[in-house]
């Protein structure tokens, strides 16, 4: 029982070992395929030792043996044990154990399954396999091997048909060793084949035919052919006795594709060996050829036995007589080498053959001690390998010379990604910087407010800026935490503006009266006017004291500012200004009928008398570069400048007053008269200029006041909204980065400018000046609120859009559009002087201004297109650049020119005329 258990364990272990065996260094079988064994780079070759599987099959008694009343000499006591039933042979070992013992009734299928299948199917896994039958003549070797081959074919093809990942190639070859001659059974005409020793492949048969098998039927036919071709002879023991050793070799190549896309194969061969049977001449009665055959058979079998015996003794390094026979040479790898081997020893049950059977069992006993070292044979086809290596070399060479496009693309995309990350971080940093600046500017503004209101004003000032939120596809703008100032500050502002308005109104009215009362027909009257204006200003109270007492609510307070008189004053001053212009330029009949100077007597000599070639017109003053424009031509300036009564003779030395060459040719008396005339003319000019500058300044102060009033209204309205809780929801909006807020507000402002027909000079100035700095926020806020309010007001009137204008549009829009038209005409005139011919042509081309129509028309066309597309930011930018160039703006202007209401309006800040046009729209 112990023996049986040991055999079973051995069988289990053998199976497990080969299931685990996957990789190894192959020894290529002897085939004509040129392959190169390649050790796999990723793993070490693994070799497992395994004993040869040895089974014994007892055939039934043949009819001949039965006829001779032969007896059974053996009994299969179990699957592994064979016991001799002949008690007369006690001196011999009567019990034999093998891996398996098949009793006489055991069919071929069982013999295959238990004695050969596992080994045979190793071939599919790349392991060489050999199955052979050994036994005396007529013991059933051929019968058994036929059964093995049949079943192998079925199993191998069943496996191939089920395989999905590999492609199999089967090749077939067959030899017989007859009288120590190797013959090709597929091509017997090739004669005796030589055996060659290949250092890698071992012993190979030269010029052996190898046929690729198409299918199982093909294989069966080939086997059948070989059977037919094999040397068979009749002996006394076997009618069809095999007189040769037959070796059928099935080479199975399974192609795989590894990760290098280099074709690799598992290559192994299955050798099915049907040996000729040992025989005793006495028994076979062989003579002649049969005797000779028997002699060769016995000799080769003897060598096989010797090899097995030696191998079974554990010797592998000593001399193993493989070369003593062709059979052992060819089977060398199967005997103690790189193969799995199964030997089925066939035994006749007849008592008459018991000695032969004992020899067979002795052989089997030795064989089961032989250890093989099977490996998985993985080969890479030489051509494919060379091709693959050549490709690799070329690729590496190319990579060395220049990076592959794919690598460069990869590098580029990485760089781009990094660049984008850097840009994003920069944007975030920018945002943070802006937030910081914003906080600083808020602090600064609050500080200014505190300074302005004085320490006694215990008021909390809160200043925050607009933000917006994008909700869904529709952009909804929320202004949150706008410039909210405490009511007491607003009240203070309103009352101060009220005082300034009163004082300014008085000054303007009295100035207009004075201008109306003076004829200005000579220099004397002009000087008198100047003097009167000066006295009038001196008599006016400059001290603006604000009543800080609590009054009514803010709406009532602001209502007091709604004074029609101040609005009409601005218009009156405009007329005065124009009249003065015409007086200076000497235009005939240019006095407006509504002008306060309409009662002035016309003096025909006046134009020639006071004409000045360098007199600036109103636009020159209004649109002068804010950095260089001296806008402080105010009451104070006027007061400081003495009116020029008469020029003295010393003035003749002034380099500015050069005498024309033609004058020297005049008689002396004439010269003196002309000189005196010139003196008067110059004096009159200066005085008129002073008056004009004063009126201009008055007008601007009125406009500024109007603007400040409007801002106050906005703030009061906003404060009311906050108090009413209308903005509560807005406060909950999450803040956006400030620079984004700025961009969005600027877009809104640009659109509102367009809708409200705001001066394009103002637009330009604002656009150029405020570029999103932290300090700009407050100005942007104010501008946005002012324009929003204005647009709302115009919308309410139904006149916000020119498309809605009827024949008699409301005055607001009409005057705005008219002012805008005048502004464009003014700018068109400057195109030829402020832009070079080249610049003009470039612009005409870019702005699609047709050549037809003449220069003047082209200039107007160009200007008419400026600031017309508020949604196109590139257009806006370019428009601003062109207008800035035309009017001579520079970025050095001060934001204070857009003075806010918490700056004392009486301060003499820079002020540009662009606001005048806006102020025309702000009639409260
Ligand atoms: N297990 C078996 N069951 C039935 N019949 C068998 C069995 N084994 C062998 N035979 C029969 O025994 C006879 C001899 O068998 P076989 O020719 O296979 O012997 P052999 O060992 O090949 O002989 P040789 O060495 O002379 O070629 C055949 O008629 C065969 O049909």
Image (spheres, rainbow, N blue to C red):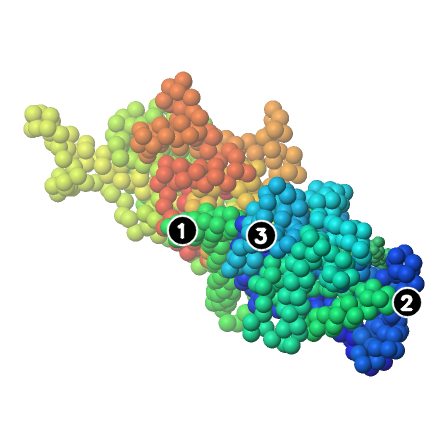
Sequence-wise, the earlier of marks 2 and 1 is 2
* Labels 2 & 3 near each other (Cβ < 8 A): no
- Find ligand 1 in the image and state its quadrant: bottom right
Residue visible at 60% across and 33% down? 801
The residue carrying pointer 2 sits among few (fewer than 14), some (14 to 19) or many (20 or more) residues within 10 Å by Cα, namely some
> Which quarter of the figure is the C terminus placed in?
top right
Residue visible at 36% across and 46% down? 890
Sequence-wise, the earlier of marks 1 and 3 is 3
Q: Which disc is residue 798 wearing?
A: none
> Which quarter of the figure is the N terminus placed in?
bottom right
The residue carrying pointer 3 sits among few (fewer than 14), some (14 to 19) or many (20 or more) residues within 10 Å by Cα, namely many
Q: Look at mark 2 in the image and give the residue it sits on.
A: 71
Residue visible at 51% across and 33% down? 868
* Labels 1 & 3 near each other (Cβ < 8 A): no
Residue 235 shows up from this direction: yes
Name the spot of residue 555 as percent of width and height, x first: 64, 54
Quarter of the image for residue 718 reads bottom right
412 or 539: nearer the viewer: 412
Quarter of the image for residue 607 reads top left
Name the spot of residue 191 as percent of width and height, x first: 59, 45
In terms of secondary structure, where does tag 1 sit? helix
- Marks 1/3: CA–CA distance: 43 Å
751 or 520: nearer the viewer: 751
Quarter of the image for residue 361 reads bottom right
Q: Look at mark 3 in the image and give the residue it sits on.
A: 205
In terms of secondary structure, where does tag 3 sit? strand
Residue visible at 46% across and 29% down? 864
The residue carrying pointer 1 sits among few (fewer than 14), some (14 to 19) or many (20 or more) residues within 10 Å by Cα, namely few
- Marks 2/3: CA–CA distance: 44 Å
437 or 632: nearer the viewer: 437
Q: Look at mark 1 in the image and give the residue it sits on.
A: 397
């Amino acid at each position: 029982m112990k023996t049986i258990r040991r055999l079973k364990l051995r069988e289990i272990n053998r199976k497990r070992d080969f299931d685990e065996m996957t990789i190894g260094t192959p020894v290529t079988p002897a085939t004509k395929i040129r392959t190169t064994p390649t050790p796999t780079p990723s793993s070490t070759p693994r070799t497992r030792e395994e004993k040869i599987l040895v089974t014994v099959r007892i055939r039934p008694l043949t009819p001949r043996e039965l006829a001779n009343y032969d007896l059974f000499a053996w009994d299969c006591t179990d699957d592994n044990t064979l016991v001799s039933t002949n008690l007369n042979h006690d001196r011999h070992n009567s019990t034999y154990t093998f891996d398996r013992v098949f009793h006489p009734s055991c069919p071929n299928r069982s013999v295959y399954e238990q004695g050969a299948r596992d080994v045979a199917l190793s071939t599919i896994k790349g392991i060489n396999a050999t199955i052979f039958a050994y036994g005396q003549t007529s013991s059933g070797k051929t019968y058994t091997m036929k059964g093995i081959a049949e079943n192998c074919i079925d199993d191998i093809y069943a496996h191939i048909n089920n395989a999905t990942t590999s492609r199999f190639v089967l090749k077939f070859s067959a030899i017989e060793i007859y009288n120590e001659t190797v013959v090709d059974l597929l091509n017997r005409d090739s004669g005796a084949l030589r055996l060659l020793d290949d250092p890698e492949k071992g012993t190979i048969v030269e010029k052996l035919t190898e046929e690729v098998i198409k299918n199982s039927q093909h294989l069966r036919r080939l086997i059948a052919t070989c059977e037919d071709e094999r040397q068979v002879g009749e002996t006394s023991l076997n009618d069809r006795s095999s007189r040769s050793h037959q070796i059928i070799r099935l080479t199975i190549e399974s192609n795989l594709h590894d990760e290098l896309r280099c074709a690799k194969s598992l290559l192994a061969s299955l050798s099915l060996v049907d040996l000729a049977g040992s025989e005793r001449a006495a028994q076979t009665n062989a003579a002649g050829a049969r005797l000779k055959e028997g002699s060769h058979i016995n000799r080769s079998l003897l060598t096989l036995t010797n090899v097995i015996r030696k191998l079974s003794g554990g010797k592998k390094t000593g001399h193993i007589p493989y070369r003593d026979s062709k059979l052992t040479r060819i089977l060398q790898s199967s005997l103690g080498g790189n193969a799995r081997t199964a030997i089925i020893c066939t035994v006749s049950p007849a008592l008459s053959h018991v000695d032969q059977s004992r020899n067979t069992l002795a052989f089997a006993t030795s064989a089961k001690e032989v250890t093989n070292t099977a490996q998985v044979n993985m080969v890479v086809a030489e051509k494919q390998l060379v091709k693959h290596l050549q490709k690799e070399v070329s690729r590496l060479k190319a990579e060395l010379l220049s990076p592959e496009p794919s690598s460069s693309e990869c590098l580029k995309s990485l760089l781009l990604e990094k660049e984008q990350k850097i840009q994003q971080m920069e944007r975030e940093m920018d945002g943070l910087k802006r937030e910081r600046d914003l906080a600083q500017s808020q602090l600064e503004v609050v500080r200014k407010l505190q300074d302005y209101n004085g320490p006694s004003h215990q008021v909390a000032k809160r200043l925050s800026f607009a933000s917006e939120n994008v909700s869904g596809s529709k952009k909804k703008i929320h202004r949150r935490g706008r410039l909210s100032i405490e009511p007491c500050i607003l009240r203070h502002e309103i009352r101060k503006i009220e005082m300034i308005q009163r004082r300014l109104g008085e000054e303007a009215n009295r100035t207009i009266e004075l201008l109306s009362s003076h004829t200005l027909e000579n220099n004397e009257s002009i000087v008198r006017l100047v003097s009167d204006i000066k006295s009038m200003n001196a008599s006016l109270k400059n001290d603006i004291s604000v009543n800080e007492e609590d009054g009514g609510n803010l709406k009532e307070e602001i209502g007091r500012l709604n004074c029609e008189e101040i609005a009409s004053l601005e218009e009156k001053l405009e007329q005065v200004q124009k009249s003065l212009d015409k007086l200076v330029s000497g235009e005939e009949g240019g006095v407006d009928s509504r002008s306060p100077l309409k009662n002035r007597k016309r003096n025909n000599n006046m134009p020639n008398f006071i004409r000045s070639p360098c007199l600036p017109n109103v636009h020159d003053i209004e649109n002068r570069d804010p950095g260089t424009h001296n806008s402080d031509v105010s009451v104070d300036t006027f007061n400081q400048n003495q009116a020029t009564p008469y020029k003295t003779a010393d003035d003749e030395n002034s380099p500015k007053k050069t005498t024309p060459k033609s004058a020297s040719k005049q008689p002396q008396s004439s010269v003196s008269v002309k000189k005196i005339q010139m003196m008067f003319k110059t004096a009159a000019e200066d005085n008129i200029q002073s008056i004009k500058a004063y009126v201009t300044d008055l007008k601007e102060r009125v406009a500024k006041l109007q603007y400040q009033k409007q801002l106050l209204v906005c703030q009061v309205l906003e404060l009311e909204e906050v108090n009413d809780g209308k903005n509560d929801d807005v406060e909950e909006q999450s803040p956006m980065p400030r620079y984004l807020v700025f961009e969005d507000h600027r877009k809104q402002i640009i659109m509102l400018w367009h809708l409200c027909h705001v001066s394009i000079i103002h637009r330009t100035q604002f656009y150029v000046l405020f570029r999103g700095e932290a300090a700009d926020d407050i100005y942007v806020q104010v501008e946005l609120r002012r324009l929003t309010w204005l647009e709302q007001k115009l919308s309410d009137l139904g006149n916000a859009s020119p498309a809605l204008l009827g024949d008699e549009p409301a005055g607001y829009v009409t005057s705005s559009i008219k002012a805008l038209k005048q502004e464009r005409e003014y700018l068109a005139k400057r195109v030829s002087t402020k832009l070079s011919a080249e610049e003009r042509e470039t612009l005409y081309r870019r702005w699609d201004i047709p050549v037809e129509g003449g220069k003047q028309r082209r200039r107007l066309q160009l200007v008419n297109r400026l600031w017309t597309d508020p949604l196109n930011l590139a257009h806006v930018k370019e428009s601003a650049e062109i207008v800035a160039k035309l009017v001579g703006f520079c970025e050095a202007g001060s934001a204070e020119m857009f003075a806010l209401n918490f700056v004392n309006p009486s301060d003499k800040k820079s002020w540009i005329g662009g606001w005048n046009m806006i102020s025309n729209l702000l009639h409260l």
